[in-house]
Amino acid sequence: MPRERGEKVVATNRKARHDYLIEDTYEAGIVLSGTEVKSLRQGRASLVDGYAFIDGGEIWLDAVHIPEYTEGTWNNHAPRRKRKLLMHKQEIVKISHKTKEGGYTLIPLSLYFKDGRAKVELAVAKGKREYDKRQALRERQDKREADRAMASRKHLGE
């Protein structure tokens, strides 16, 4: 059987970009059990409440929901267990310094397969206040209106 190529996105956390200001992003591997991999290959996972933390020089992903594999037996996995992430030591140290600054947290942005291996995209992020969210929404609407006006003006000029 040929090896898998390319990227297949399993789950994304679209709400994260709305609720947080993303500083840096990192790619990490995930330590999974067999039934978790099978469940992910079916495209079933939720990153909504997920977060990552550093404990004892290791990085962990918690509260990510990977539902039980339907064809699994009594040795199925727990849906919301702690999962170890695989990253280089230098990256973990850099992330650790950033999160200890205060106000920064680690959140998963997406879960995907890259060349057959399960990966998670982590972001070092700072929480947005309510007025920041409103301001970002207003800026997006203003830009959309300006683009529309420019397009209609260009269309009239031809």
Image (tube, rainbow, N blue to C red):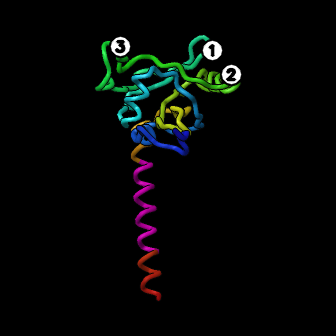
Q: Which of marks 3 and 2 is in front?
A: 3
Determine which residue is flagged by label 3: 75
Residue ID at (45%, 55%): 139
Compare marks 1 and 3 and give the one earlier in the sequence. Answer: 1
Residue 140 painted magenta: yes
- Kind of residue indicated by mark 2: Lys
Front one among 119 and 89:
119
Q: Name the residue under label 1.
A: 57
The magenta-colored residue range is 135-150
Is 115 contained in the magenta span? no
> Residue at the location (50% across, 23% down)?
52
The single residue placed furthest to the bottom in the displayed view is 158
Residue 118 location (% of width, % of height): 51, 32
- Please state the horizontal and vertical placement of residue 78, each as a whole percent of the image: 36, 16
Q: What residue type is labelled 1?
A: Gly
Residue found at the far right of this picture:
90
Q: Is residue 125 visible?
A: no
Q: Are marks 1 and 2 in contact (CB under 8 Å)?
A: yes
